Amino acid sequence: MENQNNLEKLSDKVSQILQQYHALKGENEMIRNELITLKAEKEIKDQEIEKLTEQNVMKDLEIEEIVNKIESILG
């Protein structure tokens, strides 16, 4: 009888551990997916920043050319 009771307790504990395992496994998968999404978003933002930086450099060169033309016209 006592062996049966101990066996039931052990079975309950194993069931609890399995439930926790599955819950943590699901949470881990959600976090992993979120991380993948965030990395993809970061990559898109990094590309946009690079594009804007290049555009800024081109605008600076354009402004410099305009200033040089104005200076040459003014003498």
Image: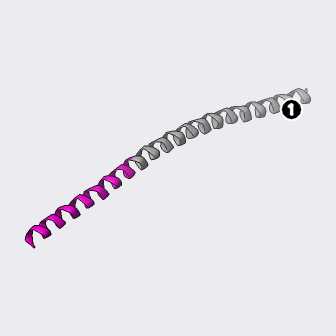
User: Could you tell me which residue is drawn at 13 percent across and 69 percent down?
Assistant: 72
Element marked by disc 1: helix
Count of numbered badges drawn on the protein? 1
* Residue on which disc 1 sits: 6
Locate residue 24, reporting x and y percent: 64, 38
Magenta part, dominant SS: helix
From what the image shows, is residue 31 above or below residue 19?
A: below
Q: Quadrant of the C terminus?
A: bottom left
- Residue 73 highlighted magenta (yes or no): yes
Q: Residue furthest left?
A: 74
- In the rendered structure, the answer to whether residue 46 lies left or right of residue 17 reads left
Front-most of 75 and 62? 75
User: Could you tell me which residue is drawn at 77 percent across and 34 percent down?
Assistant: 13
The image quadrant of residue 23 is top right
Inspect the image, locate mark 1, and give the three-letter code of the amino acid beneath it.
Answer: Asn
What stretch of residues is rendered in magenta?
48-75
